[in-house]
Image (spheres, helix red, strand yellow):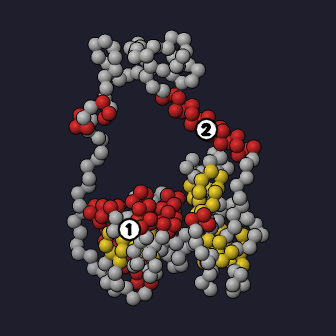
């Protein structure tokens, strides 16, 4: 659970309690941006890339990454930026990061390449008994691949021959799931848009699609088994930040992410969704979602 801080809106003076959202670090540890106690929240009047992201250090592994800047939407319509404690260099963090780097280097060195071992090993470059240029020690038990009559390794990778000689171990695409025709609902309100998206997800095959009574601070409108979904009923295209935040929430829940919008998506948001594999759908007022990127078309084809 992230930090809790009291927040007062400088516009309407309403008091709130804000909890920092928790996301998984690359090492797997839960991580929340550390909030700056006692610092006033600032209304957001103009967005920039620098202001939308903050640097956060993981206390478990020492890794530093960019995380979404915590924000709070006040009922008066003001969006508040919640201050985060800046990252400062500490000996403990430096030692943790160095230990993580040493562990990674040790894991990489253990694999090694044939004809040599990790740094400082007897078979390493320049070490005792190191083979000369072009030579290969066929008696080295560290190489278990195929060899020719002279004891030299036989090329097996894609770079050593035509692509057709090295078939990729990619599972075949699933066959399209036969489904009855989708029966939409007309969209008149923002709640109708969420209902239409829920019906569509059930039609795709997702089970136990539920609609929270109140929209969460993370922006999740629908949840299902292995799925989180967001519905944007506004007249503005969905932004890059919204796509990345939804993907992080899905990652935190070990679930897939799906996004629905009435006004479409910005160009950078669509590009990022393609990179992250987030399906994007756009809906018209008849309530029929249409896929707008590759992951959405795949989801429509195969179903849940």
Say above or below: 24 vs 129: below
For image coordinates 35% across by 77% down, the residue present is 283
Determine crowd level at label 1: few under 14, some 14-19, many 20+ residues with C-alpha closer than 10 A.
many
Q: Nearer the viewer, residue 18 or 98?
A: 98
Q: Nearer the viewer, residue 239 or 29?
A: 239
- Say whether residue 213 is left or right of residue 166: right
Q: Nearer the viewer, residue 130 or 33?
A: 130
- Residue 271, position as x, y percentages in the image: 41, 62
Label 2 or label 1, whichever comes before in sequence order: 2
Using the image, tell me which numbered label, if any, was put on residue 101. Answer: 2
For image coordinates 69% across by 84% down, the residue present is 11
Determine crowd level at label 2: few under 14, some 14-19, many 20+ residues with C-alpha closer than 10 A.
some
Residue at mark 2 to residue at mark 1: CA–CA distance = 37 Å
- Say whether residue 229 is left or right of residue 252: left
- Residue 162, position as x, y percentages in the image: 24, 35
Q: Quadrant of residue 40?
A: bottom right
For image coordinates 31% across by 12% down, the residue present is 150
Work out whether residue 191 can be spotted: no
Work out whether residue 137 can be spotted: yes
Using the image, tell me which numbered label, if any, was put on residue 192. Answer: none
Circles 2 and 1: CB distance less than 8 Å? no
Placement of the C terminus among the 4 image quadrants: bottom left
- Residue 253, position as x, y percentages in the image: 50, 60
- Say whether residue 261 is left or right of residue 60: left
Say above or below: 300 vs 170: below
Q: Which residue is mark 1?
A: 280
- Say whether residue 35 is left or right of residue 213: right
Q: Secondary structure at mark 2?
A: helix
Q: Quadrant of residue 41?
A: bottom right
Q: Residue furthest right?
A: 38
Placement of the N terminus among the 4 image quadrants: bottom right
């Amino acid at each position: 659970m992230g930090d809790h801080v009291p927040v007062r809106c400088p516009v309407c003076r309403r008091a709130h309690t804000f909890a920092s959202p928790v996301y998984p670090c690359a090492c797997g540890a839960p991580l929340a941006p550390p909030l700056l106690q006692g610092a006033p929240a600032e209304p957001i009047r103009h967005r920039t890339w620098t202001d939308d992201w903050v640097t956060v250090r993981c206390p478990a592994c020492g890794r530093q990454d960019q995380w979404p800047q915590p924000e709070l939407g006040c009922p008066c319509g003001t969006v508040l930026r919640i201050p985060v404690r800046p990252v400062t260099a500490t000996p403990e963090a430096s030692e943790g990061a160095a230990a993580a780097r040493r562990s990674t280097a040790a894991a990489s060195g253990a694999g090694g390449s044939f004809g040599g071992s990790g740094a400082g090993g007897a078979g390493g470059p320049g070490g005792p008994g190191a083979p000369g240029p072009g030579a290969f020690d066929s008696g080295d038990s560290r190489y278990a691949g195929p060899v020719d009559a002279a004891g030299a390794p036989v090329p097996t990778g894609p770079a050593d021959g035509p692509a057709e000689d090295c078939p990729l171990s990619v599972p075949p695409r699933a066959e399209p799931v036969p489904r009855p025709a989708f029966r939409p609902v007309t969209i008149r309100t923002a709640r109708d848009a969420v209902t239409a998206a829920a019906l569509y997800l059930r039609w795709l095959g997702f089970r136990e699609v539920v609609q929270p009574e109140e929209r969460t601070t993370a922006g999740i409108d629908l949840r299902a088994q292995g799925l989180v979904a967001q519905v944007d009923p506004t007249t503005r295209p969905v932004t890059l930040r919204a796509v990345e935040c939804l993907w992080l929430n899905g990652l935190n829940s070990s679930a897939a992410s799906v996004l629905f919008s009435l006004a479409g998506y910005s160009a950078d948001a669509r590009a990022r969704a393609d990179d992250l594999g987030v399906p994007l759908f756009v809906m018209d007022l008849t309530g029929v979602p249409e896929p707008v990127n590759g992951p959405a078309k795949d989801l429509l084809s195969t179903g849940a």
